[in-house]
Image (cartoon, rainbow, N blue to C red):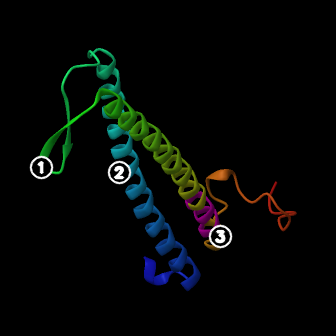
Amino acid sequence: MQGNLPPEAQEKIEQLQDLQETAQTVAVQKQEAESNLTEAENALEELENIDDDTAMYRKVGELLVETEYDTAEDELEDKVDSLEIRLETLEKQEERVQDQFEGLQDELEDLLGGGGAMGGPAGPGGPGAGGA
C-alpha cells in the first residue's frame, strides 16, 4: 500500500517509524533508570539500619574495596540524586517524542485527506458539504 502513497506521506511514515524506535529506546532507558533508582534508594534505606562502625565494602570493577560509612552514604545519595535527574530528563524526552509522534500523525492524516478520528476537518472549505 505504501507504494501508492505520495512521497510526502511516505516520508511522514518513515519519520513516524523513527520516532517509534526512539520512543522504545527511551522507554528502555527509563525502565533501567527506575530500576537503578529503586535499588539505590533501597541500599540507602538499608544503610540507615547499619551501625556506623560496621565494616563496609563497595564494588570497584571485580573487587570489593573497604569504605567508610559516611563515604558510602554520600556516594549513594549522589547516585540517587543523579538517577532522579536522569529519570526526569527521560520523562521529558518521552513527552517530546510523544508530542512529535502525535503531530506527525496529524500531518499524515491531513496529507491523506482523512480528517481522522478527531471528527473531521474543523476549518473552512466545507460549506454545503452535508446533504439533506
**Residue 84: x, y in percent?**
47, 40
Residue under pointer 3: 113
Residue under circle 1?
62
Marks 1 and 2, Cα distance to the nearest angstrom? 26 Å
Circles 3 and 1: CB distance less than 8 Å? no
> Which quadrant of the figure has residue 41?
top left
Callout 3 crowding tier (Cα within 10 Å): few <14, some 14–19, many ≥20? few
Location of the C terminus (image quadrant):
bottom right
> At 35% across and 29% down in the image, what residue appears?
70
Is 122 on the left-hand or right-hand side of 37? Answer: right
Q: Main secondary structure of the magenta part?
A: helix
Residue 6 position (above or below residue 22): below
Write the residue at 63% across / 61% down. Answer: 103
Assign a secondary structure to mark 1.
Answer: loop
Region in magenta: 101-108
* Kind of residue at badge 3: Gly
Which amino acid does the dot numbered 1 rest on?
Glu
**Upstream in the sequence, badge 2 or badge 3?**
2
Alpha carbon separation for disc pair 3 and 1: 60 Å
In the picture, the quarter occupied by the N terminus is bottom left
